[in-house]
Amino acid sequence: MSRSVLQPSQQKLAEKLTILNDRGVGMLTRLYNIKKACGDPKAKPSYLIDKNLESAVKFIVRKFPAVETRNNNQQLAQLQKEKSEILKNLALYYFTFVDVMEFKDHVCELLNTIDVCQVFFDITVNFDLTKNYLDLIITYTTLMILLSRIEERKAIIGLYNYAHEMTHGASDREYPRLGQMIVDYENPLKKMMEEFVPHSKSLSDALISLQMVYPRRNLSADQWRNAQLLSLISAPSTMLNPAQSDTMPCEYLSLDAMEKWIIFGFILCHGILNTDATALNLWKLALQSSSCLSLFRDEVFHIHKAAEDLFVNIRGYNKRINDIRECKEAAVSHAGSMHRERRKFLRSALKELATVLSDQPGLLGPKALFVFMALSFARDEIIWLLRHADNMPKKSADDFIDKHIAELIFYMEELRAHVRKYGPVMQRYYVQYLSGFDAVVLNELVQNLSVCPEDESIIMSSFVNTMTSLSVKQVEDGEVFDFRGMRLDWFRLQRHHIGDRSLSLCNMFLDEMAKQARNLITDICTEQCTLSDQLLPKHCAKTISQAVNKKSKKQTGKKGEPEREKPGVESMRKNRLVVTNLDKLHTALSELCFSINYVPNMVVWEHTFTPREYLTSHLEIRFTKSIVGMTMYNQATQEIAKPSELLTSVRAYMTVLQSIENYVQIDITRVFNNVLLQQTQHLDSHGEPTITSLYTNWYLETLLRQVSNGHIAYFPAMKAFVNLPTENELTFNAEEYSDISEMRSLSELLGPYGMKFLSESLMWHISSQVAELKKLVVENVDVLTQMRTSFDKPDQMAALFKRLSSVDSVLKRMTIIGVILSFRSLAQEALRDVLSYHIPFLVSSIEDFKDHIPRETDMKVAMNVYELSSAAGLPCEIDPALVVALSSQKSENISPEEEYKIACLLMVFVAVSLPTLASNVMSQYSPAIEGHCNNIHCLAKAINQIAAALFTIHKGSIEDRLKEFLALASSSLLKIGQETDKTTTRNRESVYLLLDMIVQESPFLTMDLLESCFPYVLLRNAYHAVYKQSVTSSA
């Protein structure tokens, strides 16, 4: 650089360029935010849309930048009222515009200083100085263009100034210059073309120096391929040689930045295009490569239209206008395909580079330049595609839709990961290189310089000293190297982010990835559930039927009916090239999961994101919805999936989810625990119904309700509820929902917690029935009290019985209780079977504990043991759940003695009512089902369980009360043996058997006791009669 009166070394050009560039990016951010705020009706300053201020705003904009407060009182009256609020709320906007003006002043001053100092610019010689100079010009240009795009700028500045004048009696001191700047830069590029005439020499020199860099960076994919660009294995003999270049920083200089320099630079000093062929070639090459440039974030600049509009009014520029039109056509026709091929080449080149470096990380030392070049090239192509995808007139849409862009980003991430992981390898290499080679060469150059100013000599000597002092030990000790002094501070360029926006984008991106993975997993689960469904027993009936018919040589069905495919044929592939839907889903899932699993954590603005947790969260939500969805519960038709079928689907789903651990390091067991445990509760964590609530409601409101209506009976022999033949057929088969296998499946799904909720719901229904029974007892309390002491006086009992009311209601309600308890017994037995399979040792310990409770044990302690046993599905002498349910019925108005008396009389009521069952046609005992079709065999369980619970609550003797019941019941039943009316005694023998069932069911009664009340010969004859009757009926 030549020297004049002004010494460049004293102007601190480097520091000023750095500070202004940094400040310029901050100003761009502020202007961008103002533009976005003004474009959003919700964020826009209210004064700009206030109807009361509308006329004032229009007046201010029309007169801008002049200030006329006189003779306009009517239009500005509303402004006078709100002046203080306007000053307060528009200050941030106004002073941002003032800061832009000050920034412009500083830039113009620095550009003038550079011109006076006649600074020499050449990107290949003084890279940092030239780059920062060009960056500053582009930042300045972008800032002025963005300012001109804020449509409300005049209204905001004018409103603030009018409010200032009304408040302080004078305009703001910055307003005259600011207003003039706004007017001058209505067309910013046109104004700046005039402004940059004095700076054309410096700017054109800097731009023309790009002739050695830009064309070399802007080659086609074929040229890259022929040169074997970025390949480490193309020349094995030179693999260990350090990658060097005379213009090292230029090799990974951003192509996007260079195109901005060239486009905006030659617009500002357009005269050089007519006189310098090199400048014209650079200009045309840049115009052919892109259709638009990014100003800031999503603000773009359409190159060709803007350039043509600027040049059309300049005399003698017809050739330049034709050049622009030709380049535009070339960009539209060929740029898309050229960049597509570049991305295609870079995918394979980066993949090869990442693979080689992962195998031989030591090459990161000599070949670090290759890594930075690869990352730079890939970044440029991705930025180009994102910029043009929505802003370029597309002749071929395929060129702007790249399904493989994620793959290119992935390889970039691979290279970055290698650099981070093997940073010490690179440090060790370059520390030795700097101290053992660069320092020696630089020292020789300094010694051989004939003329060297003192200040430059000092700087160079410090370089030599700094590099010589470097040692490998510093790397081994983990010392942090600080080369900021060598880089003269001003080479550091900082990136500016808006924190909240970055966090939300990161969150949105990870959430979207997790959603895609979740959807793929759901599709795979659906396929697997379909395959599992084919293995259900119900589907083999047709196959068995065909086999049986084939054996007996019976021909069924139509001729030529296609044979049903057996499960598993989908796995028998004739050709490995055939890709099934499941194959595609697994391939896509493996790629997504690899990405999710690639980094354990991401830190953005001091917030840590864990990609795997996003997937875990989505899987939990989807698994929950899927389980509930697979129940296929329809409230209108009361249809629901069989528990066994749901269990099969859930297991298939869990198998797929378990396999996810092969792709991603997540704890899928945690997902299972969170989801399945929530499904054992009434509502999940989101307050939504669970399978526990759905199945509980269905069994109570649908199955057991139909039992009460007489459409279904409990068959003890089958341990299931079975449909009875009726006029109105039910929409479901009760046996398919209540047999042993279905109840075990239900226990597997609901678990002990869910089964406990089911039991509590059943007990609530029982308690409501008992409450009604007590009301009936209260209605008949006097009669029942007399009957209790008169059971040995037949005539008096007969007379008293006729005075009883609601006898049928009592028996019906007790039968309903018995049915509910029978269903609970099935559920408990199934739960015990399931737990015995999963936790046999724990169940056996609980069982042993229960069986060895001493009789003299305190009842509270015994109830705790019974509660534990009941939770494990073990039967207990006293049902703890029933005790809890009936305990809540204690009335405050009735004394404990009265409650106890009602409980005793309830047992009396049931005992004396039993004979009436003999007249019912449906009371006939069926040996085949070991019960009665009207479910009165369930009375045995109801009587024993209710008695045990009530007299535990009232601290009475269960055994004594049941003995009393047996005496009353046997006395009442013996009387019907003397009846001669056939209608009354129609099913006398079947009802006799109830006494035997009650004793068999009870842990408190014995057959000896029954023998003392009711002759066993009658029971034997009753069994003989019902079996004989059954055979006759069958015949």
Image (cartoon, rainbow, N blue to C red):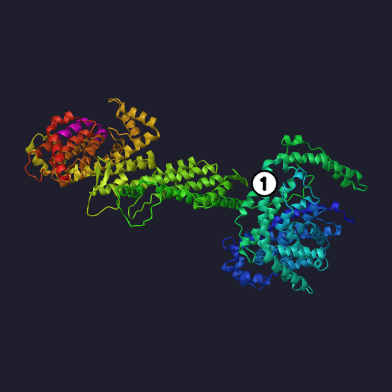
Q: Nearer the viewer, residue 618 or 328?
A: 328
Q: Vertically, is 826 above or below 128?
A: above
Q: Is 403 included in the stretch rendered in magenta?
A: no
Taking the magenta stretch, the answer to whether it contains residue 962 is yes
Confirm whether residue 782 shows in the render. no
Residue sitting at the far right: 450
919 relative to 766 in the view: left or right: left
Q: Kindly report the secondary structure that dominates the magenta region of the rendered protein.
A: helix
- The amino acid beneath tag 1 is Ala
Residue wearing tag 1: 354
Task: Indicate the position of residue 653 as horizontal and vertical percent values.
Answer: 45, 46
Residue 222 at least partly seen? yes
Choose top left, top right, bottom left or bottom right for residue 174.
bottom right
Instruction: Give the extent of the magenta segment.
Output: 950-968
Instruction: Check the image and report above or below for 730 versus 768.
Output: below
Relative depth, front residue between 748 and 704:
748
**Image location of residue 686, percent across then percent down:** 44, 48
Q: Quadrant of the N terminus?
A: bottom right
Is 777 placed left or right of 577 in the picture? left
Q: Residue most toward the front? A: 553
- Please state, as top left, top right, bottom left or bottom right, where the C terminus lies in the image: top left
Q: Please provide percent x and percent y for residue 846.
A: 35, 30
- Residue at 70% x, 51% y is 374
Q: Position of residue 932 (x, y in %)?
A: 20, 43
| SS at circle 1 | helix
- Mark 1: give few (<14), some (14-19) or many (20+) Cα within 10 Å: many
